[in-house]
Amino acid sequence: MSPEASAAPTTSVTAAPVTGHPAGGETRGAPAGTGATPGAPTDPSAATSSPAARRSGAFATPAARRRWWLTYLGVTGLAVCFAVGLLVWRNPMAPGTRGIWLIAERRLDAVVAMIVVAVCQAMATIAFQTATGNRVITPSIMGFESLYRAIQTATIFFFGATGLTATRTAPMFALRLALMVGLSLLLYSWLLTGGARNLYSMLLIGIVIGSALGSVTTFMQRLLTPSEFDLLSARLFGSIANADPEYYPIAIPLALAASAALMLCSRRLNVIALGRDTATGLGLSHTRATIGVLVLVSVLMATSTALVGPMTFLGFLVATLSYQLSGTYDHRYLFPMAASLGLLVLTGAYFIMRHVFYAQGVVSIIIELVGGSVFLAVVLRKGRL
């Protein structure tokens, strides 16, 4: 056998692994019509500029990516349907009249509040869990809601019922936001960047601070008159009815800015999720990045809580569902899924409870009950925090 005949099979076999194709396949990156043949020598610069044969992505397979898009579009579609239903369902005015638009506009204020709360709670919870490296704890569980209750109770305790009513203005809303952001930043930055980075220490300190604020709040409530206490009780439960359209010029820009900043930090959050040591090894300043995430989380949580009141387990519920339905670690896909799920939970719950069971006032209680049950189920299934 001639040397030329014996060398041909060897050349074709060795060329296949280099190009990333099986033997006999076309050379990757060769333009059509150039006459490139298997085994022909290629220019190293051309091979370098060609697309890589292997790459990593947010999804393991194209089927997983399609499944995410189908799930996301389905969830978003249901949320939009429930939102439209809240606007037009059982509108008492005749179609085409001015009254039907006035009622729809009034209902639109509630839908806007649901959108703001869903985005704030969902994105803040996922970002906080990534920064802490745990998918169980949330800003609400760490005592954030106690700050809101303490501020509301102190307002009516020192200034009376008229003072609480007078605080329903945009400047006072901005003041509450600033106070809550400052206090939360002081708490979380110390917990995550100080010496108490152990998860159990964080939980213990958060619970202690929440309990201390709760005790002070309860003491002030016992000194209130019955009428003042009744007025305060309506503010201490999370409800879309607490949202005032006067707050929207402040709440909506803050929510949009903080949410957009978290979306821009999605790749950095992916690195933070790998852990402090790995993130530092990859060249990321873990402490600085964590502080930046905490600032955005505090702004989102303060905006949501100051707008409608405390909703302790809403963020945990939508974040847990988002992890299960997304099937990816990438925050570029986790954030949109969680926001759509949060809107679906709020609009669906309010639509069903308003038009089916005629019990709109218990929506927040049901959400807290379901979210708390999911929290207990997650903890019991893992057997640990």
Image (cartoon, rainbow, N blue to C red):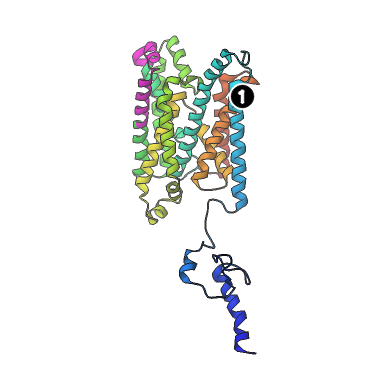
Residue at image mark 1: 85
* Residue 87, above or below 383: above
Q: Residue furthest front?
A: 33
Magenta region, residue range: 156-181
Label 1 sits on a secondary structure element that is helix
Position in image of residue 184 (x %, y %): 37, 33
SS majority, magenta? helix
Residue at image point 43% right, 28% down: 252
Instruction: Please state the horizontal and vertical placement of residue 232, each as a whole percent of the image.
Output: 44, 16
Q: Residue at x 40, y 51 (%)?
A: 276
Q: Position of residue 247 (x, y in %)?
A: 42, 22
Quadrant occupied by the N terminus: bottom right
Check disc 1 and give the amino acid type: Gly
Query: Which quarter of the figure has residue 290?
Result: top left
Give percent across and percent down for residue 349. 59, 26
Is residue 301 magenta-colored? no
Count of numbered labels shown in the rendering: 1
